[in-house]
Image: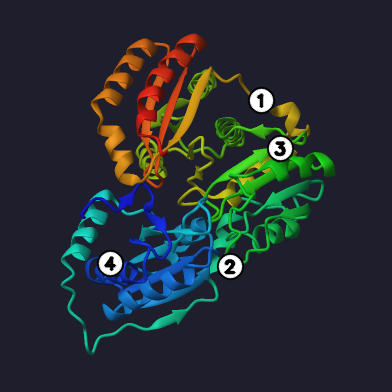
């Protein structure tokens, strides 16, 4: 089992089916308690709004308590909140129970270290080995306690608004916010109202079953229509745990994440607030982003897919901003992970200072031709089988030769879903279509019937 459960963003699956069971969560709590929680003997656990969160939080807590670790019980909090405040809580680690943008029937467990960063593959593999051996020894006289913390949200809000020095900077702003019936439902609208904005709110009535359901960053159709119908200045959607963002302009047109990254980097640099001179994105970013940033005098670095890789590279080149096309944007001077609200606040400040509508600011640049296809397969085992298939490898090699010097080819087995992503971008549209078609035809042999 070791190395098979944890993907690029924790472990994820259908709730009440292995590994998203109470039994697995309890054993994971025991393993983390014994291996990780050795200094402070303390862990913080939060969850999103889906119905299975309480079951998994209770089971994880039981595992930690049995290992003699105190549990700071945080209830519903966004992922960026718990990564941001982990260090302030003086814990050995934190846990976020969420399946992010997935439907309610899925859930997941993200493991976060004492500094607010995601666990490495090496540590999660070691934890899987401990769970597989299942030889945990009970501690009869050294049990942990559950501790309530009522200040966690306040700590996060102080951090996420630290760069705002005007009490009502948004008094001229009318905005539509879609909270995905998730963690930000009762938080984000109030923050924007407190800062003076006129707010129309969507997706803010979570019931345990409607997280990400026809709302949020994955389903923005109502957001687009509401912005147009209400003559709002901007529309912003987050996903269920709040770590990704989607934005549309005043005409209800989506602004690609690559353009948000470029705009914010240039804004912060102009204000003298940008650390370093680099921008980090992933191999799935449109190739036009790299050209644009280099023309603006920035260095540009491309990483493998996933927030962990982005943050690692940001630390290496000591820069302020990084992100990926999916909407995970990390403003490293103000948050420890992708943070939909931090980016939304920063974006609104920048657009207000531009003194013109978002539809006149964007697009910043023209995208290179690209093809991006998600191919659904039966399960995670089939994802690996497709990625390891010789026919698929040969197709990728052929496509790379075709796109050499004019673009980029990516075959990305999802680390959280049963999907294979095929992505090709470059300056020659005919070659982009041909190269992507070669790979897609091979991968579709593994497609779910």
Which is closer to the viewer, label 4 or label 3?
4
Q: Which mark is residue 32?
A: 4
- How many circles with numbers are drawn on the protein? 4
Nearer to the camera, 147 or 242:
242
Pick out the residue farthest to the bottom: 141
Left or right of residue 118: residue 275: right
Per the model, the C-alpha gap separating discs 2 and 1 is: 36 Å
Helix, strand, or loop for circle 3? helix
Q: Disc 4 and disc 1: Cα gap in Å? A: 46 Å
Q: Which mark is residue 351?
A: 3
Residue at image location 71% in from the left, 44% down from the top: 223
SS state under label 1:
loop
- Identify the secondary structure beneath mark 2: helix
Estimate how packed mark 4 is, as few (under 14), some (14 to 19) or many (20 or more) residues with alpha carbons within 10 Å.
Answer: many
Nearer-the-camera pick, 239 or 74: 239
Q: Secondary structure at mark 4?
A: helix
Position of residue 84 relative to residue 25, above or below, is above
Residue identifier under label 2: 154
Mark 2 packing: few (<14 Cα in 10 Å), some, or many (20+)?
A: few
- Residue 229 shows in this picture: yes
Q: Which residue is mark 1?
A: 363
| Disc with the residue nearer the chain's start (2 vs 1) | 2
Q: Are marks 2 and 1 in contact (CB under 8 Å)?
A: no
Q: CA distance from mark 4 to mark 3?
A: 44 Å
- 410 and 389: which is toward the camera: 389
């Amino acid at each position: 089992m070791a190395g098979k459960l944890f993907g690029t963003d924790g472990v994820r699956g259908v709730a009440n089916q292995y590994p998203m069971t109470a039994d697995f969560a309890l054993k994971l709590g025991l393993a983390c308690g014994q291996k990780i929680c050795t200094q402070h003997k303390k862990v913080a656990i939060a969850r999103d709004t889906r119905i299975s969160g309480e079951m998994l939080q209770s089971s994880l807590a039981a595992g930690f308590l049995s290992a003699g670790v105190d549990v700071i019980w945080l209830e519903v909090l966004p992922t960026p909140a718990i990564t941001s405040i982990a260090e302030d809580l003086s814990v050995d680690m934190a846990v976020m129970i969420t399946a992010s943008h997935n439907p309610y029937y899925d859930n997941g467990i993200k493991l976060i270290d004492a500094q607010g960063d995601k666990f490495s593959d090496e540590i999660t593999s070691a934890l899987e080995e401990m769970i597989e051996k299942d030889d945990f020894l009970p501690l009869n006289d050294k049990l942990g306690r559950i501790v309530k913390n009522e200040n966690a949200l306040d700590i996060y809000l102080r951090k996420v608004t630290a760069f705002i020095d005007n009490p009502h900077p948004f008094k001229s702003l009318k905005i539509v916010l879609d909270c995905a019936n998730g963690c930000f439902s009762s938080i984000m609208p109030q923050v924007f109202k407190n800062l003076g904005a006129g707010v129309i709110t969507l997706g803010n009535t979570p019931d345990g079953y409607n997280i990400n359901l026809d709302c949020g960053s994955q389903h923005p159709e109502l957001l687009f229509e509401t912005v147009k119908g209400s003559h709002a200045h901007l529309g912003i959607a987050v996903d269920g745990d709040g770590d990704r963002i989607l934005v549309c302009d005043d005409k209800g047109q989506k602004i690609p994440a690559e353009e948000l990254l470029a705009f914010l980097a240039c804004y912060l640099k102009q204000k003298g607030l940008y650390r370093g001179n680099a921008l980090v994105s992933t191999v799935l970013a449109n190739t036009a982003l790299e050209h644009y940033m280099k023309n603006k005098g920035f260095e540009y670095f491309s990483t493998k897919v996933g927030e962990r890789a982005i943050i690692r590279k940001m630390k290496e080149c000591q820069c302020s901003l990084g992100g990926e096309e999916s909407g995970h944007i990390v403003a490293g001077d103000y948050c420890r992970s992708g943070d939909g609200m931090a980016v939304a606040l920063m974006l609104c400040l920048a657009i207000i200072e531009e003194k013109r509508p978002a539809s006149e600011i964007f697009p910043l640049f023209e995208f290179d031709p690209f093809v991006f296809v998600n191919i659904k397969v039966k399960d995670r085992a089939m994802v690996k089988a497709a990625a390891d298939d010789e026919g698929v490898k040969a197709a990728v090699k052929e496509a790379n030769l075709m796109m050499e010097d004019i673009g980029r080819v990516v075959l990305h087995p999802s680390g959280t879903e049963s999907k294979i992503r095929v992505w090709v971008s470059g300056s020659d549209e005919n070659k982009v279509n041909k190269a992507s078609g070669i790979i897609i035809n091979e991968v579709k042999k593994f497609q779910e019937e």
